Amino acid sequence: MSSPNDRFLTGLKTSAASLPILAAEEMEPRFRAVPGRNGERRGIRLERIYWDGLSRMSTAGRVTTADLVHHTATQLQDSGNLASSLRVLSLKWALHRLDALEDVSSLANLNAVIQASPSPTVLLTREKKIQLFNDAFLGMLRRGFPMGDAPQIMKTLRFSVDTHIEDALSTLNRNSGKTLNTGFTIAVGSQSLKGQINLALAPMHCKSMLIGYIAKY
């Protein structure tokens, strides 16, 4: 049995493996002369990744980088540091965007998408488990296994797709915006139900999962 310290070290390794790698050019300071509102030019030195962040901000907000610099400069106190403030501005904007995306890609919102589907629909994990399903899927089970009770069926059924889950995830990640059609099998005891299912990447920020829309059974 592993000790608490072993589990802690394993957790650290797992966390480190998911962290981004820092590139030297991203940390290299770059000097730019940014025009001001009254014809003056401000000399600003920032790491490239912050310039990239300001560029994305300006594109999303349909303003210029000079506008962002002016906006930040007007909020400075007399002793304020403009470069530091621009770094904070860039990170704060990125965090707000991240919060919004995490809210949209939450499990609760994904469940609403699945429930809204008129066809039998499931959410499959990497471990081939059904995480979520809709009423149409339950209806399909009742018709396919009429002798069973739906809650009991859900506890004992075995769901599989003809394409390996990892292969499906890799294929869909390589082909953004596409779906993958494959066969599926549901088994309950000695009974089974086969058909076709359309797989799509689930819009989740924390885990890789698949939405399966059953097309034929």
Image (cartoon, rainbow, N blue to C red):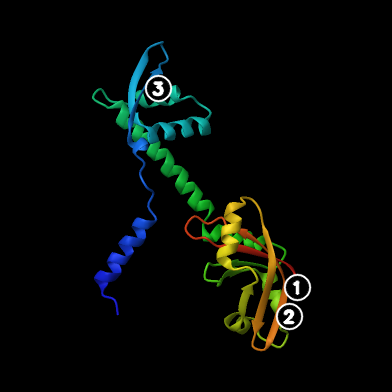
- Report if the CB atoms under discs 2 and 1 are less than 8 Å apart: yes
Q: Position of residue 66 (x, y in %)?
A: 43, 22
Is residue 111 something that shows in the picture? no
Pointer 3 residue: 70
Instruction: Mark 3 or mark 1: name the one nearer the start of the chain.
Output: 3
Q: Residue at x 71, y 88 (%)?
A: 147
Quick check: 29 above or below 205?
above
Q: Which mark is residue 144?
A: 2
Density class for disc 3 (Cα within 10 Å; few <14, some 14-19, many ≥20) is: some
Residue drawn at the location 43% of the way across and 26% of the way down: 68
Amino acid of disc 3: His
Q: Is residue 199 above or below residue 24?
A: below
- Residue 217 disc label: 1
Q: Are marks 3 and 1 in contact (CB under 8 Å)?
A: no
Q: Secondary structure at mark 1?
A: loop
> Looking at the picture, which amino acid does disc 2 mark?
Gly
Mark 3 lies on a secondary structure that is helix
Foreground: disc 2 or disc 3? 2
120 vs 6, left or right, is right
Q: Quadrant of the N terminus?
A: bottom left
Mark 2 and mark 3 lie on one chain; the one further toward the N terminus is 3
